[in-house]
Amino acid sequence: MKNRKKVTKTRSGGITVGYKEHLKTMIEIIDTECKYVMWFQVNGKAFNLDKPVVFGVVYIPPEYTRYSSDEAVNEIEQEFLRFSNISNYICLLGDFNARTGCDDDFVIINEDEHGDNNLSDFIENPINALEALSIPTKRESMDKGKNRYGNMLLNFCKGNGVFILNGRLGRDQNIGRFTCRNASVVDYCISTPELLKTFKDFEVLDSSKLLSDVHNPLSITFFCDKNLAIAHAENVDYFSKKNTFTKIKRWNSEKIKDFQNNIDVEKIAELEYKLTNTDLTVVNKNMINSLIDDLCNIFVKSGQTTFGTYTVKQNKKRGDFGNKNKPWFDEECKFARQNYRKLKRRFQVPKIILKTIQTC
């Protein structure tokens, strides 16, 4: 967990990353200075990749509050650039409190503006990665509004060649569902072009007071190695010989009452007793994991009873899509490209002025 410590006397809020005990050997938490993002990396073998996948869980406080900071996106960007030297596979997700409307999160490279030079030999266009995977270039959003943080986030995406997945991918494709109070989109999943091929689904789930009063959970599914131990999670029964597993059917809001009634009250009472009688001075990670597992099992069992289960086959390994960097395109070139995009955006001259200059 990464906490806020400076604004109030006590630690308030923060970012938490949770994972199953059996995955601990594949996940590494990365400690950094930025308080607006918590980084962790997952062994690339889980995704059939040659480098680790770096995730950043983000929380940027709302504009015009005592916690807000205009430097939040810049601080996240500095650490993003640092991790870009380690891996091309980076995913940012969380609450950015940024409204971006349907504006583009990419820069179209127009060679005509730069003379006769063939820039494609020097600058890789990240939009090609979207087209190669049949992902829409134009994203949709139910939230047409924008704010200052939204402009900052769009500039971050343009400057670093990364893409917002909301309204582009999976069950949220061509929708861009609201993520907060059924009125705005402020929670995002953002990916580097190289990581796009590993995404299987992206969905904005129905809001749940178990998780948040105002935000909708984001559900992100990846193509992973079929032999990964993730198949042993509580809500999945794995049959290695048949190469199939069972899953709980999708959440149905009309069955909320049934879900509540199917929760094992005796198990809840047992868990409450454990929590009440736990000596906080001797609490350790194993005890916390055990309590969380007990709570998850209660909800999973209720979900199985309420919504039922179904059996599916393991997916075959997905092919390698998307453009790779050319052999000569090293880290120095990558850094130069990022600077080029930032400078181009910062000193962009309006077309009407260019036409006036040409006329003169």
Image: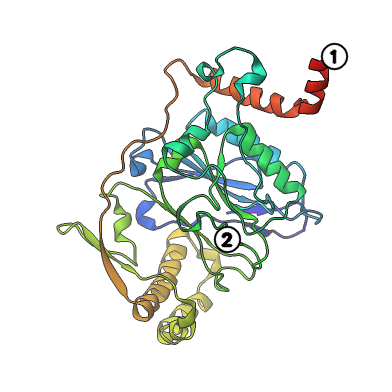
Which of marks 2 and 1 precedes in the sequence? 2
Q: Position of residue 337 (x, y in %)?
A: 59, 22
Q: How far apart are marks 1 and 2 (CA)?
A: 49 Å
Q: Which mark is residue 360?
A: 1
Q: Which mark is residue 190?
A: none
The quadrant holding residue 13 is bottom right
Q: Position of residue 6 (x, y in %)?
A: 75, 51
Q: How is the image coloured?
A: rainbow
Label 1 residue SS: loop
Q: Can residue 231 be seen in this view?
A: yes
Residue at 61% across / 55% down in the picture?
141
Q: Where is residue 137 in the image (x, y as percent from the top left)?
A: 54, 42
The quadrant holding residue 262 is bottom left
Q: In this view, does 295 lie to the left or right of 84?
A: left
Q: What residue type is labelled 1?
A: Cys
**How many numbered marks appear?**
2
**3 or 253, nearer to the observer:** 253
Residue linked to disc 2: 177
Residue at 38% across / 81% down in the picture?
306
Whether pointer 1 and pointer 2 mark residues with C-beta atoms closer than 8 Å, the reply is no
Q: Position of residue 249 (x, y in %)?
A: 36, 71
